[in-house]
Image (tube, grey):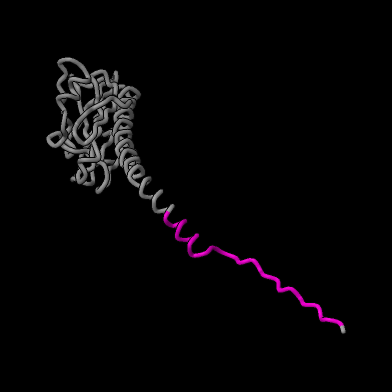
């Protein structure tokens, strides 16, 4: 008598992940996120501060360039309510922003020009720029600086435009310094006011 052949059962491979594998993968992702998130937030905050500083420096440079190009005085104005400050080259002398004038806007809730009163270490910043330097802070709600036809400031002095996130002083500060020659420098500080030259 012949014995019937027994057909071997084929096992099909399982697709997907087991619960243990998923838990381990999630745990690894959570650890990596917990380590990386503070660094990401710090880099993003610095990016916001540096971006605002660059915008302010660029509008000063554009205003200076326009004064030289037009061979006449041009005023750089900073004005607006807190949280909606604008800086612009007032080419027509109207004291209001026009569409054809170089301008930079600083939206609320992010980094914007701030008054010097709340900025720490301004005396140390002045000393870092040069011996005997006195900084003239430009008001974020109605300040201005005038460039002459050579690109120098019309009133001799070292001007400072301070920038910060008004609601987050611990993020740090930026200062855009305008020298009498019309040269622009960018400085950075941590939340305690330890300043260093950036650009």
In the rendered image, the vertical position of residue 64 relative to residue 117, given as above or below: above
Residue 24 falls inside the magenta stretch:
yes
Image location of residue 195, percent across then percent down = 23, 27
Please indicate, yes or no, whether residue 159 appears anywhere in the rendered image. Answer: yes
Q: How many numbered marks, from 0 up?
A: 0
Q: 33 or 103, which is in the foreground?
A: 33
Q: In which quarter of the image is the C terminus?
A: top left
Q: In this view, does 60 lie to the left or right of 144?
A: right
Q: Is residue 93 visible?
A: no
Residue sitting nearer the eye, 176 or 1:
1
Is 21 placed above or below 11 here?
A: above
Magenta range: 2-27
Q: Main secondary structure of the magenta part?
A: loop
- Look at 56% across and 64% down and name the residue there: 16
Q: Does the magenta stretch include residue 13?
A: yes
| Residue found at the very far front of the displayed protein | 1
Q: Name which quarter of the figure residue 77 lies in.
A: top left
- Quarter of the view holding residue 144: top left
**Foreground residue among 42 and 168:** 42
Q: Where is residue 83 in the image (x, y as percent from the top left)?
A: 22, 46
Looking at the picture, tell me which residue is in the foreground, 190 or 57: 190
């Amino acid at each position: 008598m012949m014995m019937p052949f027994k057909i071997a059962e084929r096992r099909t491979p399982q697709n997907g992940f087991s619960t243990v594998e998923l838990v381990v993968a999630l745990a690894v992702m959570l650890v990596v996120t917990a380590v990386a998130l503070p660094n990401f937030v710090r880099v993003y905050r610095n990016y916001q501060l540096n971006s605002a500083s660059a915008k302010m420096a660029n509008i000063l440079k554009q205003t200076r360039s326009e004064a030289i190009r037009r061979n006449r005085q041009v005023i750089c104005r900073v004005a607006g309510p807190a949280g909606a400050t604008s800086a612009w080259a007032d080419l027509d002398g109207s004291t209001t922003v026009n569409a054809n004038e170089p301008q930079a806007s600083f939206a609320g809730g992010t980094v914007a020009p701030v008054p010097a009163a709340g900025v720490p270490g301004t005396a140390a910043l002045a000393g870092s720029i040069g011996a005997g330097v006195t900084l003239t802070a430009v008001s974020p709600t109605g300040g201005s600086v005038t460039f002459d036809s050579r690109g120098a400031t019309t009133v001799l002095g070292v001007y400072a435009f301070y920038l910060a996130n008004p609601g987050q002083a611990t993020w740090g500060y930026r200062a855009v310094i305008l020298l009498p020659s019309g040269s622009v420098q960018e400085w950075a500080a941590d939340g305690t006011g330890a300043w260093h030259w950036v650009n």
